[in-house]
Amino acid sequence: MLNPQRSLSELPKTSTASQVERVVLEEEFNWLLKEEVHAVLKQLQDVLKEASRRFSMPTPGFENQLKQENFILGSSTMDQVKGVLTLQGEVLTQADINLKVAKSSQVLHFQFREDKQWKLQQIQDARNHVNQALQLLSSRDESYHFKSGAEVNKLMDGVMLQLTRARNRLTTPASMTLPELAASGLMKMFSPPIPGDVMVNFYINLSKLCLTVYQLHVLPPNTTKNFKPAGSSVLHSPGAMFELNNNRFEVSHVHKVECVVPWLSDTLVFFTISLQLCQQLKDKVTWNYQK
C-alpha cells in the first residue's frame, strides 16, 4: 500500500534505482560467466590432468615406458597367503603367490606364466572416465562465452557424472558368482596351474590392491547338506556353495590380503577436490542467477 504522505515524484527515482541495481547485478553475472567460470574450469583441468597422469606414470629415464611397481601383500595376523604383485598402470604383469594349505601345512607356489598379463578393468574404466571429463572441459576453452547459468550447470553436471563414475569404479569392485570366477581367464594364467580346489581373484577397493584366495572342497553326491548356491558377491564367505561341471563345491577357507597403492590414494583425493570445485561453481552460478 502506498504511503499517502510520499511524494509521487519519488516513484520514478525508486524505479530508476531498482533498474540500476538490476543492471549492476546483470553485469556482475556476465563477469562471472566470462571470467570466474573459466578460472574454475582451468583449475579443474589442472587437477584432473594430475589425476590422469597418475594412471600412466613413466619409468624414470624411459618416458615411453610405464613404471612397474611391486606390491607385497600379506597380513600381520596370518601367514596362509602371501603375494607379490607387479602393477604397471592398469595391468598386473606378474603375480607370485604362496598358499599354505590349511590341513597339511603344505605350501603351494604359483605365478603368472611369462606370456600372461591381467588387466584390472576398474583402473582402465576410471582412467577413461577422467579423460572424458577432461574432454568436456577442453570443449569450452577461454574464448568460449557462456550464455547462461544453465549452460554452466549443464557442463558441471556432465563433468561430475564422469568423476562420480570414475570414483565408483575404484570404490565398488564388481560382484561375481563363484562359477563365474571359476570359469574366468584368470584361473588359466598360472604356472604351475592352480589346483582344482583353489580359486583366486584380484580387484581394487578404494586405494587398495586386493588378492582373495578361496580353498574349496567337493561335496559328495549323497551329501545330506542342504545345497544352496551362493549368489553374486565381491567377497564370498566360508560355507558358500556352487555347482560347476556337475560337481558341487563348498568354500572351506577364504584368505584376503591387500596393499595400498599410493597413486590410487592420490587419485581419489583429486576426484574429491574436483567434485567440490564443480559443486561450488554450480552453487555460485545459481545463487547469482537468483539474486
Image: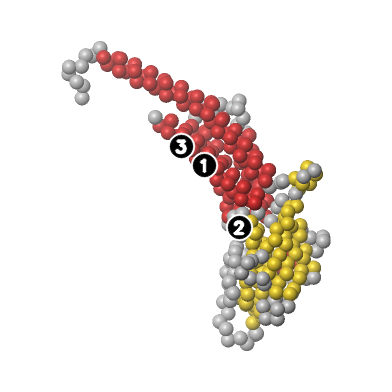
Please indicate, yes or no, whether residue 177 appears anywhere in the rendered image.
no
Residue 66 numbered mark, or none: none
SS for tag 2? strand
Residue at the extreme right: 114
Of the residues shown, which amino acid type is indicated by label 2?
A: Asn
Residue that carries the numbered disc 1 in the rendered image? 276
Which quadrant is the C terminus positioned in? Answer: top left
Residue that carries the numbered disc 2 in the rendered image? 205
In the image, residue 143 lies at what x, y percent? Answer: 61, 25
Question: Do the residues bearing badges 3 and 1 touch, measured as CB atoms within 8 Å?
Answer: no
Q: How many marks?
A: 3
Question: Do the residues bearing badges 1 and 2 touch, measured as CB atoms within 8 Å?
Answer: no
- Residue at figure coordinates x 70%, y 58% from the top left: 71
Residue that carries the numbered disc 3 in the rendered image? 283
Which quadrant of the view contains residue 144?
top right
- Residue at figure coordinates x 17%, y 18% from the top left: 4
Residue at the extreme front: 76
Residues at marks 1 and 2, CA–CA distance in whole angstroms: 22 Å
In the image, residue 5 lies at what x, y percent? Answer: 17, 17
- Residue at figure coordinates x 61%, y 60% from the top left: 174
Who comes first in sequence, dot 2 or dot 3? 2
In the image, residue 244 lies at what x, y percent? Answer: 67, 74
Which quadrant of the view contains residue 288?
top left
SS for tag 1? helix
Of the residues shown, which amino acid type is indicated by label 1?
A: Gln
Q: Is residue 206 above or below residue 227?
A: above
- Left or right, residue 267 beside residue 194: left
Please indicate, yes or no, whether residue 140 appears anywhere in the rendered image.
yes
